[in-house]
């Protein structure tokens, strides 16, 4: 931010959970700590779960968090045109 930036956005691919890495059983606590951290700084963090590799509720431990899956601004119309509404990857 000292270089003139107004904030920071980060993104993490969560497929490492498939490797059962040390600490992976504590993913809910990990995301809770991240949520608390990002609430106090000018930063945004996003954990990405591949639905095809990590299906079901276990793949989305923070699914009850109202901030999950919401975008601050809608996607441009042309970027979602042609998607089937009943497709599992379609939001909305």
Image: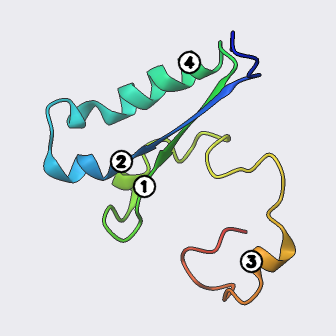
- State the CA–CA distance, disc 3 to disc 2: 24 Å
Q: Is residue 16 above or below residue 1?
A: below
Residue that label 1 marks: 49
Is residue 50 found left or right of 85 in the rendered image?
A: left
Dot 4 falls on a residue whose secondary structure is helix
Are the residues flagged by discs 4 and 2 in contact, CB closer than 8 Å? no
Are the residues flagged by discs 1 and 2 in contact, CB closer than 8 Å? yes
- State the CA–CA distance, disc 4 to disc 3: 32 Å
Nearest to N terminus: mark 1 or mark 3: 1
**Residue lying at 77% horizontally and 84% vertically, measured from the top left:** 81
**Residue lying at 65% horizontally and 24% vertically, measured from the top left:** 43
The crowding category of the residue bearing disc 3, from other C-alpha atoms within 10 Å (few below 14, some 14 to 19, many at least 20), is few
Nearest to N terminus: mark 4 or mark 2: 2
Dot 2 falls on a residue whose secondary structure is helix
**Residue lying at 67% horizontally and 41% vertically, measured from the top left:** 66
Question: Which mark is in front, 4 or 2?
Answer: 2
Is residue 24 found left or right of 33 in the rendered image?
A: left
- The image shows residue 59 at horizontal and vertical percentages of 37, 54
Extreme residue in the top direction? 2
- The image shows residue 62 at horizontal and vertical percentages of 49, 41
Nearest to N terminus: mark 1 or mark 2: 2
- The image shows residue 28 at horizontal and vertical percentages of 38, 33
Dot 3 falls on a residue whose secondary structure is helix
Nearest to N terminus: mark 3 or mark 2: 2
The crowding category of the residue bearing disc 1, from other C-alpha atoms within 10 Å (few below 14, some 14 to 19, many at least 20), is some
**Which image quadrant is residue 4 in?**
top right
Residue that label 4 marks: 36
């Amino acid at each position: 931010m000292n270089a003139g930036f107004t904030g920071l956005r980060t993104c993490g691919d969560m497929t490492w959970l498939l490797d059962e890495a040390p600490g992976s059983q504590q993913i809910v606590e990990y995301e809770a700590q991240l949520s608390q951290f990002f609430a106090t700084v000018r930063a945004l963090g996003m954990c990405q779960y591949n639905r095809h590799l990590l299906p079901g509720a276990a793949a989305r431990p923070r699914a009850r968090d109202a901030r999950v899956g919401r975008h601050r601004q809608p996607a441009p119309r042309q970027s979602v045109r042609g998607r089937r509404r009943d497709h599992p990857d379609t939001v909305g």
